[in-house]
């Protein structure tokens, strides 16, 4: 999980990710990667905090960008725009990657 310390919503996203992994029996390490500079943001192609990546790929697709910069990321949840995805969104995205069983 990539994060920018100026956006504390990464803490909620980390908690949700850990809860989903535990509930689904997924054994995985979660590495928190601080993105502290504009240069790091560009090099890591950082679309905002929090960014959850599995094997280097964003769990939630983002449009190609010309520039990457330090900033907060917003997720369109079923209820409203939020600073982190919901547990259901994380579970569905993981199911698309066959990391958890699809129960739909």
Image (spheres, rainbow, N blue to C red):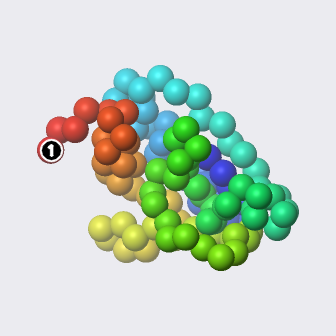
Side of 3 where 77 appears, left or right: left
Side of 23 where 53 appears, left or right: right
For label 1, the residue is: 104
Q: Based on the displayed image, in which of its 4 quarters is residue 70 positioned? A: bottom right
In the rendering, at what x and y percent does residue 101 appear?
Answer: 25, 32
Q: Residues within 10 Å of mark 1 (few under 14, many from 20)?
A: few
- Which quarter of the rendered picture does the C terminus lie within? top left
- Residue drawn 42% across the image and 26% down it: 26
- Whether residue 102 is visible here, answered yes or no, is yes
- Residue drawn 55% across the image and 38% down it: 55
Furthest residue to the left? 104
Q: Based on the displayed image, in which of its 4 quarters is residue 73 positioned? A: bottom right
Count up the numbered dots.
1
- Whether residue 15 is visible here, answered yes or no, is no
- Residue drawn 65% across the image and 76% down it: 66
Side of 51 where 78 appears, left or right: left
């Amino acid at each position: 999980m990539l994060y920018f310390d100026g956006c504390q919503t990464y803490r909620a996203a980390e908690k949700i990710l850990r809860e989903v992994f535990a509930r689904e029996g997924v054994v995985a390490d979660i590495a928190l990667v601080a993105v502290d500079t504009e240069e790091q943001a560009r090099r890591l192609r950082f679309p905002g905090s929090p960014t959850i990546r599995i094997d280097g790929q964003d769990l939630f697709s983002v449009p190609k960008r010309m520039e990457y910069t330090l900033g907060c990321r917003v997720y369109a949840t079923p209820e409203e725009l939020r600073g982190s995805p919901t547990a259901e969104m994380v579970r569905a995205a993981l199911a698309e990657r066959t990391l958890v069983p699809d129960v739909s």
